[in-house]
Amino acid sequence: MKLRVAWALGAVLALTALLAGAAMAPASGHETRGAGDLRFVVGWGEEPPFTGLKNSVQVTVVEANGGPAVTDIGDSLKVEVSKGSAKMTLPLDATGPSAPGDYRAWLTPTRPGAYTFRLFGSVRGQAVDESFTSSPATFDEVEDVAAIQFPAKDPSTGELATRLDREVPRMQARTDSVDARLRVAADRVDTARALGLAGAGAGALALLGAAGALVAVRRGGRRTPDR
């Protein structure tokens, strides 16, 4: 009886250790790195990541000596996501008691390629400043969503942006050309109006002059000559 109890207790302890080790094991496609008394496991929350689909930066924090997950980082740790010169800083949210030490920063990647996640701040008074870049040796790069579209492939947000960047200057040039033509037409109308007003004024003056001359002639005809 005692032997059976010992075997059962040993099996329970072994299973518990196995589950704990699995919980703290690096996720597939993630990069693991120790920093001081901590160990970080960093990558995409959904793999592989695709453009235009909501995803997250997944950060798991555990004690470097194999201890339990760190669940009390509060808001002292943030992640900066960068691609090329574009950068954005996001807060890390705990996913809940079902996944202790698992934190997420939510975003939607819009361009394929490599991304860099920089963790900075502090955890339990320990300063943190670590950068993780996607690569074949770390975690997945973002793929174009067209690779999984079916039955038709829609243009990606990047392609739409490129088209807009190409078409907007053309449309602006056409608008500027129309505006220039309208200004020329308006100038011609103003000139014609001015000439018309000037002609009308000259005609009125001519009529006044003719009327004055006619009156003078009539008055002169009525006078009796001296004899």
Image: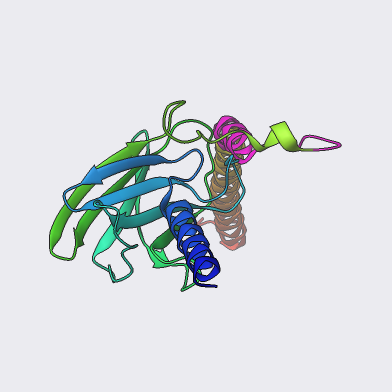
Can residue 184 be seen from the camera position used here? no
Which residue is at a point 30% across and 53% down the rendered structure image? 66
* Residue at the farthest right position: 151
Q: Position of residue 78 (x, y in %)?
A: 29, 58
Q: Position of residue 212 (x, y in %)?
A: 55, 57
Q: Which residues are magenta?
A: 150-173
Up the image or down, 28 lies above or below 62; here it is above
Which residue is at a point 78% across and 34% down the rendered structure image? 153
Q: Does the magenta segment cover residue 166?
A: yes
Left or right relative to 158: residue 70: left
Q: Nearer the viewer, residue 97 or 220?
A: 97
Can residue 165 be seen from the camera position used here? yes
Which residue is at a point 52% across and 45% down the rendered structure image? 109
Magenta stretch, main secondary structure, is helix
- Number of numbered discs on residues: 0
Which residue is at a point 55% across and 73% down the rendered structure image? 1
Scheme of colours in the image:
rainbow
Q: Nearer the viewer, residue 144 or 198?
A: 144
Snapshot quadrant of residue 84: top left
Q: Position of residue 43 (x, y in %)?
A: 44, 44
Q: Does the magenta segment cover residue 153?
A: yes
Q: Nearer the viewer, residue 167 or 177?
A: 167
